[in-house]
Image (cartoon, grey):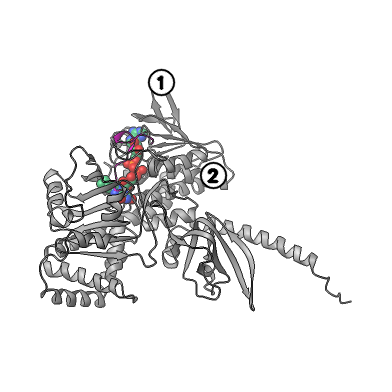
């Protein structure tokens, strides 16, 4: 049997998150260009029109600047009812102060979205969030959605077979797009995958219903990022959406104690109205996040895309899902579906994400150290504030922080920019100067002004 | 501006990019309409109109020549900016990203060809040399 897709070939995609839907979208787009008919089935149990856990793929919901731009070029629009809020700046909070960083053109370049229907106490479901939107685009091109969780896969006469209920069907290609928050590993075992899949850790998300007015006043159209000296916390952000803010904590095994420490820190309290206390019973979850890729994401007629394979460390996971899904589709349509084809044409794209994460790990380790050394964190903030106050072109710290926290540039790029002698010199100078200042600089009012 | 909008808002007649300027970014229309104008001598000639989903400013990214035309909002419009370096890096990683742009450029060449034929029919025939 030829290891290529032909007119009438069938593809099964297990999982209809961003990776699965985008893979279907690109398979069908490329097949059309080649005047080839493909039958694409997406298996997905979730109904993205449902608010709460039943329709949500648990994430911070930031669509990075680079992904917004790539999708725009692809002709994939993110309409205003999918984008809960366009983000044009971010505010960096440390234990002592806060500084705001704008996009060069004061443009809304980042999209804050809901995954699926949104938090369980959402007042109105619009469009099913980014997952629903991307799935609808795949369906418009002819993908069929089968509303079921796949529990059984095996091989029949050299073809992968998917069984659910009473029906079973063989396919020419099986795409694993099941993320890391379900038992995808089981399916891989059934197929005879040697790899044990990605390494993960637990993160934390909660969605606070503050209402449009409070959000506009206190958070504005800025993403709020926190560099606090809390052990095990690698990254924390508050992302304003329509009537909700999403609080997202990433690090090693985030637990209750860490979540409490975060909400009790002065920097976080200052972001909220003075009378505010975190709601009991707000929608929250502890999803798993991929922190190290699966080693070998393919075999003959099977390929893993999105979180189930490799993702970008902590940032732009949806962007990584787009890149792996598209690379797999390109390989399948234009080259073939054998392990060799994936090795030659898919693995480079996959590896470039995985390889870049090594730089990400080092960068986050450095940030950890900076957080612990008060003059250094002060120096970082001073350097940024100075750059923002001037309209000149030297925005090196601002851009390093922007790219790091928004996931807009490869970690490797960021890493090497911070090694430039000018950069190190200026940071050292600002840190030395900061030894003369002390105390927390901003109160609640200032945080609000900064967000505004 | 609506909470969920992306890009930058331009008021009626506000210029997004100007003919002759260096081009270091390209644009994608998110909402509204824009006019493409060629400035010729003292006047301007309308050479096209852009709507949602249209990409413009991409020629300067490929050929590194100054902007060939001015683009101005016609009524309120919203436009997303893509920087040159980021775009080129992505195209080098994934050349298929340029396909969409090639497709649009080829459509534009077709309609330009049609225009050229129309103009040839309108203008008086050139004297033929024997
Ligand atoms: C706390 C946290 C915050 C994050 N914040 C961001 C952010 O702000 N921006 C960003 O870009 N990324 C973020 N990410 C990463 C992002 O969530 C993922 O990278 C992205 O969702 C990956 O997409 P995916 O399609 O591979 O997997 P998923 O989104 O997990 O989708 C997998 C799908 O497969 C389905 N599925 C699973 N098993 C089966 C089965 N057996 N049969 C059928 N269907 C199945 C599931 O129902 C699900 O719909 C965050 C992650 C975490 C944990």
Q: Magenta includes A441? A: no
Q: Is residue A350 above or below residue A376?
A: above
Q: Which residue is mark 2?
A: A31
Which residue is drawn at the image coordinates 23% and 72% (left, top)?
A: A383
Residues at discs 1 and 2 in contact (Cβ within 8 Å): no
Residue A408 is left or right of residue A2, and the answer is left
Image coords of residue B39 (percent x, y): 61, 74
Q: Is residue A359 visible?
A: no
Q: How many marks?
A: 2
Tag 2 subunit: A
Residue A46 is left or right of residue A33, and the answer is left
Which residue is drawn at the image coordinates 20% and 57% (left, top)?
A: A226
Mark 1 to mark 2: distance in Å?
Answer: 30 Å
Secondary element at image label 2: helix
> For mark 2, does the 10 Å Cα neighbourhood hold few (<14), some (14 to 19), or many (20 or more) residues?
many
Which residue is drawn at the image coordinates 39% and 54% (left, top)?
A: A349
- The residue segment tinted magenta is A49-60
Which quarter holds ligand 1? top left
Which residue is drawn at the image coordinates 15% and 51% (left, top)?
A: A262
Image coords of residue A111 (percent x, y): 37, 53
Q: Nearer the viewer, residue A386 or A220?
A: A220
């Amino acid at each position: 049997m030829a290891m290529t897709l032909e007119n009438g070939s069938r593809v099964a995609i297990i999982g209809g998150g961003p990776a699965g839907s985008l893979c279907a979208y690109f398979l069908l787009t490329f097949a059309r260009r080649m005047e080839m008919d493909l039958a694409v089935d997406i298996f997905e149990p979730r109904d993205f029109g449902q608010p709460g856990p039943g329709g949500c793929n648990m994430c911070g919901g930031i669509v990075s600047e680079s992904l917004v731009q790539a999708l725009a070029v692809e002709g994939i629009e993110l309409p205003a009812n999918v984008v809960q809020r366009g983000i044009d700046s971010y505010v960096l909070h440390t234990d002592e102060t806060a500084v705001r960083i704008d996009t060069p053109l004061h443009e809304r370049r980042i999209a804050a979205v809901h995954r699926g229907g949104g938090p369980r106490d959402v007042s109105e479901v619009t469009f099913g969030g980014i997952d629903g939107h991307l799935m609808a685009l795949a369906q418009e091109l002819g993908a069929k959605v089968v509303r079921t969780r796949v529990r059984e896969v095996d091989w029949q006469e050299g073809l992968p077979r998917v069984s659910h209920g009473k029906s079973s069907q063989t396919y020419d290609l099986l795409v694993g797009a099941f993320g890391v928050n379900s038992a995808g590993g089981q399916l891989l075992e059934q197929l005879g995958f040697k790899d044990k899949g990605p390494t993960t850790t637990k993160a934390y998300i909660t969605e606070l219903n503050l209402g449009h007015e409070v959000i506009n006043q206190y958070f504005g159209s800025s993403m709020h990022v926190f560099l606090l000296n809390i052990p095990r916390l690698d990254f924390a952000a508050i992302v304003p959406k329509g009537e909700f803010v999403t609080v997202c904590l990433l690090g090693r095994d985030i637990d209750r104690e860490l979540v409490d420490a975060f909400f009790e820190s002065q920097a976080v309290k200052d972001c909220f109205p003075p009378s505010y206390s975190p709601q009991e019973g707000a929608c929250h979850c502890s999803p798993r996040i991929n922190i190290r890729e699966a080693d070998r994401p393919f075999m003959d007629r099977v390929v893993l895309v999105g979180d189930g394979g490799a993702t970008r460390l902590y940032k732009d996971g949806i962007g990584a899902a787009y890149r792996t899904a598209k690379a797999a589709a390109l390989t399948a349509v234009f080259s073939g579906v054998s392990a060799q084809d994936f090795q030659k044409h898919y693995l480079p794209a996959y590896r470039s994400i995985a390889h870049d994460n090594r730089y990400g790990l080092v960068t986050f380790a450095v940030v950890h150290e900076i957080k612990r050394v008060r003059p250094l964190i002060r120096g970082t903030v001073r350097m940024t504030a100075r750059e923002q106050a001037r309209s000149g072109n030297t925005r090196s710290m601002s851009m390093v922080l922007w790219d790091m926290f928004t996931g807009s540039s490869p970690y490797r790029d960021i890493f090497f920019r911070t090694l430039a002698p000018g950069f190190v010199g200026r940071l050292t100078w600002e840190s030395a100067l900061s030894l003369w200042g002390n105390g927390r600089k901003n109160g609640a009012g200032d945080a609000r002004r900064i967000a505004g | 501006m609506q909470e969920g909008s992306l890009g930058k808002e331009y008021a009626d007649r506000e210029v997004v990019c100007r003919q002759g300027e260096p081009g270091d970014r390209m644009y994608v229309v998110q909402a509204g309409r824009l006019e493409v104008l060629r400035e010729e001598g003292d006047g301007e000639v309308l050479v096209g109109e852009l709507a949602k989903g249209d990409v413009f400013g991409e020629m300067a990214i490929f050929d590194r020549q100054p902007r060939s035309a001015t683009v101005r909002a016609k009524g309120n419009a919203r436009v997303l900016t893509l920087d040159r370096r980021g775009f080129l890096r992505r195209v080098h990683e994934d050349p298929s990203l340029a396909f969409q742009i090639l497709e649009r450029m080829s459509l534009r060449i077709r309609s330009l060809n049609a225009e050229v034929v129309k103009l040839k029919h309108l203008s008086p025939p050139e004297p033929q040399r024997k």
